[in-house]
Amino acid sequence: MRVTASAPGRVNLIGEHTDYNAGFVLPFALPFRTTVTGVRSRRQQWTVTSAWAPGQSTSFGRPEAAPGTATWVDYVRGVVWALLDEGYEVPGADLHITSDVPVGSGLSSSAALECAVLTALIELGDLDIPVTDRPAIAQRAENAFVGVPCGIMDQSASILSEAGHALLLDCRTLETEHIPFDATILVIDTRAPHRLVDGEYAQRRATCEAAARELLVPALRDADLSDVDRLADPVTRRRARHVVTENARVLETVALLAAGKVTDIGPLMTESHTSLKNDFEVTVPELDIAVAAALEAGAHGARMTGGGFGGCVIALVEPRDVAFVTESVESAFARGRFTPPSCFVAAPSAGAHLE
Ligand code: GLA
């Protein structure tokens, strides 16, 4: 038996660092996908080959504990581990992987890999796992096996997105709504190297969880601005203020989209960036410069997307302004002597599926 499954990377329209605070996010899937072709093997053994490492293959038996350092094959191992750990009969398989999702740009290439492998293995093993339960399995592979303490946004976007729509996800109830989204989003990959990502991300998460404990609420989703003012430490206060205001911005964005006021979400995107820069402190100069240059060139709004510390900016632009905004951002980067950014327009695309 042979199956081919693919899963996309994502950008997040708004709702950053809210997922692990039980809040709201609004990502959409990119037209870039990771594709896995799988053939069942007779033994419980998995062999992985990929276009990234031609001529090389890695084989493993039943994965045990988490590895020390993660390579991309560990994301595959992690998915096999998570399925086995939840009691599913995962068939052994030969898996071949190709991808056009940019790696290291904060566009969730790892979620795309996990979700494509998961979709292929579910089909190969004829496993009865509802689509809505799948993001948590892929997230578990990343949290408990690879050791990255991410929230559930990226895997949900990769699995549950629909073309032409952004995905509103309530990260507490895991309820979703597909929000029609028809506007031009210019993605600016700053190519800024991710700096200290893992440690800083885990630290932000820990600070948010400590803030919730101090406020005696289950998560920062349950706090409001008056609660935030009661937090003793000024840094913690800023972090919590970002989460509280960001959740409100997601809901406001959804209301504006429902009312057909697409361009009005621009200022909310820009406020989100300011909050991530000043309160959550996860931007770097390249992200701030890309946002400023895009706005200067006439974008309705712009913000960093993803975890921060490098990665991409998204800008809401009129179709006729794409070239001008792109050139303006490129010139600003050249003036600052930064690596040239890579810019592309991204339409909301389909989530994971069999080919
Ligand atoms: C990364 C994580 C997500 C989310 C974002 C920030 O992409 O994988 O779970 O926390 O950062 O919004």
Image (cartoon, helix red, strand yellow):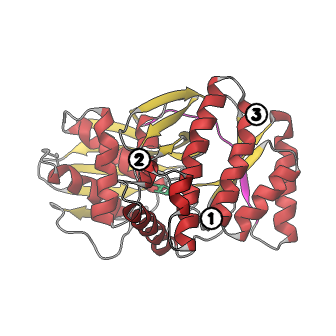
Mark 2 and mark 1: span between their CA atoms? 26 Å
Q: Earlier in the sequence, mark 3 or mark 1?
A: 3
Q: Nearer the viewer, residue 238 or 17?
A: 238
Which comes before the other along the chain, label 2 or label 3? 2
Among the 4 quarters of the image, the one containing residue 3: top left
* Number of numbered discs on residues: 3
Q: Position of residue 301 (x, y in %)?
A: 76, 45
Indicate which label's residue lies in the foreground, 2 or 1: 1
Q: Quadrant of the N terminus?
A: top left
Q: Is residue 280 on the magenta stretch?
A: no
| Residue 263: numbered disc | 3
* Pointer 2 residue: 155
Dot 1 crowding, Cα within 10 Å, few <14, some 14–19, many 20+: some
Q: Position of residue 39 (x, y in %)?
A: 25, 43
Task: Tell me which segment is drawn in magenta.
Answer: 340-351
List x then y, in percent, for residue 183.
70, 32
Badge 2 or badge 1: first in the primary sequence: 2
Residue type (three-letter) at the residue carrying disc 1 = Asp
Between 2 and 91, the one nearer to me in the picture: 91
Residue 187 visible (yes or no): no
Residue type at mark 2: give it. Answer: Gln
At label 3, counting other C-alpha atoms closer than 10 Å, the crowd grade (few under 14, some 14-19, many 20 or more) is: some
